[in-house]
Amino acid sequence: DGGITQSPKYLFRKEGQNVTLSCEQNLNHDAMYWYRQDPGQGLRLIYYSQIVNDFQKGDIAEGYSVSREKKESFPLTVTSAQKNPTAFYLCASSRTDRNTEAFFGQGTRLTVV
Amino acid sequence: GENVEQHPSTLSVQEGDSAVIKCTYSDSASNYFPWYKQELGKRPQLIIDIRSNVGEKKDQRIAVTLNKTAKHFSLHITETQPEDSAVYFCAASEGVTGGGNKLTFGTGTQLKVEL
C-alpha cells in the first residue's frame, strides 16, 4: 500500500481537547477529501480541497477545521466543538478531472473519552 | 443536496450464487457512480464505476447497471467467492466546480458469502 497515508491508525483523546489527524499523499493529486465513517451511516464528507490554500465545507463540517498549505498534505483538526467526535476518519485524494477515482487512506480511528 | 439510498443493508449468499445490491439517487445532475469494497479494518477500494453516458459496465464477475430515468444503479456479483465478503458502498457524484468529485455514499451493504 502506498500513495495516501494517514497517521496514526488509532488515536485516543480526552473530551475537550483538540486533535489533529494527518493525511499525506504522493500521488500528485490536486483534490483531497476528509470523510467520517460511522456504523450504519456510510461515509459522510467533512471537508474537501481542490487546490493548495483553498478548501470547502462538506456536509458535516461543524466542529472540524482543515488546512491545505502543501499539495501533499491535508490535516484535519477535530475541535472540542464537535459533539460526537468518536468515529473512523478517512482521507482520500483524486485528480481534478471529473468522474475519476478517489483513493483512500487506511483511516484513523479516533476515540474520545 | 444529493441523497443516496442503498439496499439491502446485509446480504448473505451461498458460494457460487449471485449477489445484487441496489442504490437510488436523488440528484439528476449526478453523472458518476462508483462502487467501493471495504474489508474489515481496511480502506475502501474502488471495484467498478460507471458514468452516466453508459447503461452497463462489466469487469469479470462484477457488473454495474445504471437507469438514469429511474435514478437507480445496481451492482451484480456472479459466482461469489468467500473473498467477496466485505462491505460494499455505492456513491454518486456530479463533480464540482474546479474539479474533483463530491461523492455522496450509500449506507453500505455487508455481504457474507457462505461456504
Image (spheres, grey):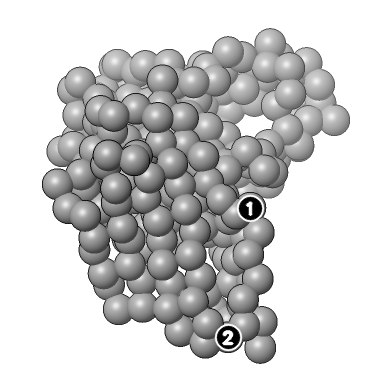
Position of residue A80 relative to residue B64, above or below, is: above
Residue A52 occupies which quadrant of the picture? Answer: top left
Q: Residues within 10 Å of mark 2 (few under 14, many from 20)?
A: some
From this viewpoint, which residue is outermost toward the right? A113
Q: Chain of mark 1?
A: B
User: Where A49 falls versus A36 (above or below)?
Assistant: above
Quarter in which the N terminus of chain B is drawn: top left
Q: Earlier in the sequence, mark 2 or mark 1?
A: 1
Q: Quadrant of the C terminus of chain B?
A: bottom right
Chain under numbered label 2 = B
Percent coordinates x, y for residue A79 in the rendering: 64, 16
For mark 1, what is the residue? B9
Give the number of marks. Answer: 2
- Specify the label residue B15 is tagged with: 2
Q: Relative to residue B50, is residue B31 depicted above or below?
A: above
Could you give the CA–CA distance between mark 2 and mark 1, rounded to whole angstroms?
19 Å
Q: At 34% from the left edge and 18% from the top edge, which residue is drawn?
A: A55
Q: Position of residue B50 (x, y in %)?
A: 25, 53
Residue at the location (29% across, 29% down)? Answer: B28
Above or below, comparing residue A111 to residue A60 in the picture: below
- Kind of residue sitting beneath label 2: Glu
Q: Residues within 10 Å of mark 1 (few under 14, many from 20)?
A: some
